[in-house]
Image (tube, grey):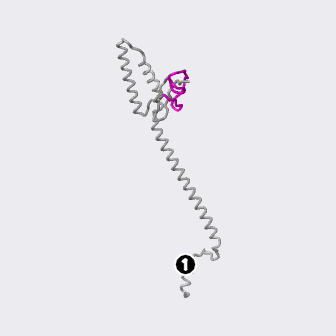
Amino acid sequence: MNENENVELEQQIPSNFDESISFEGLDAKYVELQKQLEELTDKYYRANADFENIKKRFEKEKADIATYANEKFARDLLPVIDALEMAVNFETEGDEYAAKIKEGIYITIDQFKKCFEKNGITAIEANEDFDPNFHNAMLQVESEDVEKGKIVQVIQKGYLINGRVLRPAMVSIAK
C-alpha cells in the first residue's frame, strides 16, 4: 500500500473508533445475548400457545352458549307439558265435550313435543335399568314382577337438552 491509500483508509475510520477494544469480551456477550434470545423465544411460543388455548376455549364456550341458550326457557315449560299430560289421563267416558277437550290437549302435547325436538329437547327413556345420571329414585317399592334396582314406575318424566340433563326423571325402583 502506498501512502495515499493509507491516508484514504484512515479517513474512512470514524473519529470515535477506539482501537483498544478487545474481542475477548465479545464471546461472553454473544453467549449472554444468545441465552436471552432463547428465553424470549420460549416466552413468545408459550404466550402464543396460551393465546391459542384461550381462543379455543372461548369458541367452545360460545358454541355451548348457543347450544344451551334455551335451557332456562325449556325448564320453565316442563311443568306446562306435565300438567297437560296429567289432564289427558282423566277419564272422560261418555262425555262428548270432555273427549273433544282431551283431543285438543293431545294435539297441544304433540305440538310441544315437535317444538322440543326441534330445539334439541328429548324425553329421557324410562327403560328398566335405573341410571343415577338420568333418574332420581323417589321411592323404593316391593315388587315381585320387577328385579331389585330396576325402575317400577315413572313419577315424573325427565328431559335432555342436546344430550345434557335438563331435568332428571323421578322414578320409583324395586327393592
Was residue 140 drawn as part of the magenta stretch in this picture? yes
| Residue closer to the observer: 128 or 114 | 128
Above or below, 48 relative to 62: below
Above or below, 40 relative to 25: above
SS class of the residue under badge 1?
helix
Relative placement, left or right, of 36 versus 157 is right
Three-letter amino acid code at the position of disc 1: Gln
Above or below, 91 relative to 175: above
Residue at 52% over, 29% down:
130
Relative placement, left or right, of 24 versus 61 is right
Above or below, 158 relative to 35: above
State the image coordinates of residue 117 (x, y, percent, origin top left).
Answer: 40, 32
State the image coordinates of residue 61 (x, y, percent, origin top left).
Answer: 49, 41
Q: Where on the picture, by quarter, is residue 32?
A: bottom right
Q: What's drawn in magenta, residue-wise?
A: 128-152
State the image coordinates of residue 119 (x, y, percent, origin top left).
Answer: 41, 33
Residue at 50% over, 44% down:
58
| Residue closer to the observer: 101 or 10 | 101
Was residue 47 drawn as part of the magenta stretch in this picture? no
Relative placement, left or right, of 139 versus 108 is right
State the image coordinates of residue 161 (x, y, percent, origin top left).
Answer: 46, 33
Dividing the image into 4 quarters, which one contains the N terminus?
bottom right
| Residue closer to the observer: 173 or 154 | 173
Residue under label 1: 12
Local packing at callout 1 (Cα closer than 10 Å; few below 14, some 14-19, many 20+) is: few
Dividing the image into 4 quarters, which one contains the C terminus?
top right
Q: Where on the picture, by quarter, is residue 7?
A: bottom right
